[in-house]
Amino acid sequence: MRRTQPSALSQLVEITYKRRRLVTRAMMIVLIAAFLVATVPLFSVFFHVVRQGLPALNMDFFTHLPAPVGEAGGGLANALLGTIILVVLASVIGIPWGVVIGIFLSEYGKSRFAALVRFSVDMLASIPSIVIGLFVYALVVIPMKRFSGLAGGLALGILMVPTIARTTEEILKLIPVHIREAGLGLGVPRWKMILFIIVRGSMGAIATGVILSVARVAGETAPLLFTALSSRFWFGGLDQPIASLPVQIFNYAISPFEEWQSQAWGGALVLILFVFVTNIITRLALRRAHGSGQS
Amino acid sequence: MKIIRKRRDIHHGDRYFYFLLKGLASGLPLLLFLIAAFLLKASWPTINEFGAAFLFTQDWDPVGEHFGVLAFAFGTIVSSLIAIAIGAPLSIFTALFLTELASSRVAKVAGFLVEMLAAIPSVVYGLWGIFVLAPILRIHVEPFLGKTLGFLPLFQGPPYGVGMLAAGIVLAIMIIPTITSVSREVFRSVPQSYREAAMALGATRWEVMRIAVLKTGSTGILGAVILGLGRALGETMAVTMVIGNRADISASLFSPAQTMSSVIANEYAEATSATHVAALLEIGLVLFLLTFIVNSLARVFVWRASLGRSAR
């Protein structure tokens, strides 16, 4: 009887089921669309930077000083050199400090004090980079009474610490306990075990984290504005203002001169290629290391 | 005898090592404290002179030496809210796509693409914003919005291209990787048995996501969104380049504005009087405190979300 006359209930079930299936199908499309929309800017930025930046790149771009307003030609060689100097300086401060904090958090990370340090790492990572710049301005620039490469390097170095500390901690935590125990069981002191077994064994992965954070600070602009400032000349000492690629891109981008805007695109291309290439290479290296470790 | 002494030496080495590490690590909380202390000290002249009025007045006049941050705070908050309104749904759906829908191979590549959004330097986003996004907004989007939704005060006024809307969109792009990756972690930590339970009750694919994943992860998602907000509040270069830099409080999203970080970036060079410099530093202090609070809040939410489920 039921088979010949479908009840009102089963009809209702049928209708709601159709609706639910429709909603599900629509939501699946929404999810895929959301992902596609989210990646549009990536491709758009890359496309425009390559298209507008490529014509600006020539020998002069990499070897010459900026040309005065109105003159054609010139390059960003001093800014490229300046960024390298600033990044090296930042690395000298940021890498050892960040790695040591990472080791501390992974190996002695259970105390209350360690929780405070971990909290500080998180907070430091979330402070806007321009605020770090202001801090260094108040700490170094005001007493020295001038902008300097030293101040810029310090600001970038501080920015590196939290990312390096975090990745180092996460990497070291991946090492199984039995390896630590094996080391200690052989009568090796703990500090030797940590340095020569744990840290040495994950040197490659730590280096990956370090390289990624270097790539990140190389593109930082805001903290350099009032620490390193900028310069139209070659490097003249660490106590002098120093040019950097990101600041130069900023200055040229907001300038009204087409020649300069074109060079800003060129600089952006150099910066983006550097960031993308380091990201891709380090990730591939990391994946290969992980793959061989698992199989 | 000898053996015992040797063992003691070993312990000494360990102790020195521990103190060395601890000493270097304690530099970090100290640094955080120093940042607050130096900003406070350097901005003391204006704190002293204007007090709370600094926060609640709109008058920013470096020549007349009168400083109030309200218009910039408005710009910061509104641009960040636009960013959240656009970026949060996109990110959450993207994270759902990556964890629930995509095969692990697709998710790997797709996740990498989203992460690369975070690798693009801020100044490059700004450059793109000035020369690509702003013209599109000026020529296509803003006139269209004005025509269709122009009855709302939000979408009135001449289309400049650069302005609050442009800043909000660029910020949205910049916070997508943050919110997506945190949401992804949250969704991943939802136990598989929840999904299976929902499926066993006859839920469709979307209903599984809604009931088992989104609902369980809601605290964590909130944390992720607040983290994104924290990032948007302090973002400087891209915003400075596309927001138009005019300290107006306007209901229209098309009009130029100014944020707390963009005013610092814009005026550092021309700040000559000591009061002006102190005022800029005080903005930095306000930003520091604001992001500190917002991020602590986010941390509590994310921490709670991951603690509640995965017993790690």
Image: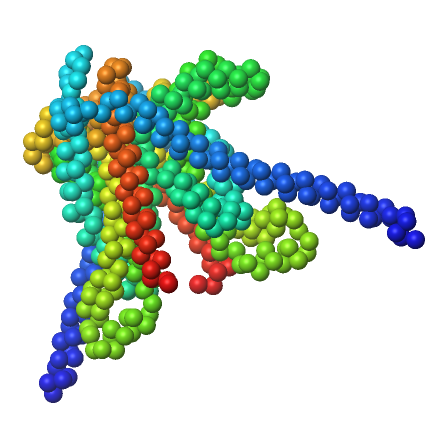
Query: What colour-coding does the image apply?
Result: rainbow
Residue B152 place in picture, x, y as percent: 56, 20
Camera-nearest residue between A121 and B138: B138
Q: Locate residue A78, reporting x and y percent.
A: 14, 29
In the picture, the quarter occupied by the N terminus of chain B is bottom left
Vertical comparison of A105 with B142: above or below: below
Q: Residue at x 28, y 25 (%)?
A: A53
In this picture, residue B147 sits left or right of residue B19: right
Percent x, y for residue A212?
Answer: 28, 45
Give the number of callouts.
Answer: 0
- In the shown orientation, is residue A124 left or right of residue A85? right
Q: Quadrant of residue B118?
A: top left
Residue located 21% across and 44% down the image: A157
Q: Residue furthest bottom?
A: B1
B290, A110: nearer the viewer: A110
Q: Is residue B309 left or right of residue A220?
A: right
Question: Left or right of B148: which side holds B116?
Answer: left
Residue B276 in view, yes or no: no
Q: Residue at x 20, y 56 (%)?
A: B24
Query: Is residue B106 placed above or below A267 in the rendered structure?
Result: below
| Of residues A151 and B197, the one drawn nearer to the viewer in this rendering | B197
Q: Residue at x 41, y 50 (%)?
A: B299
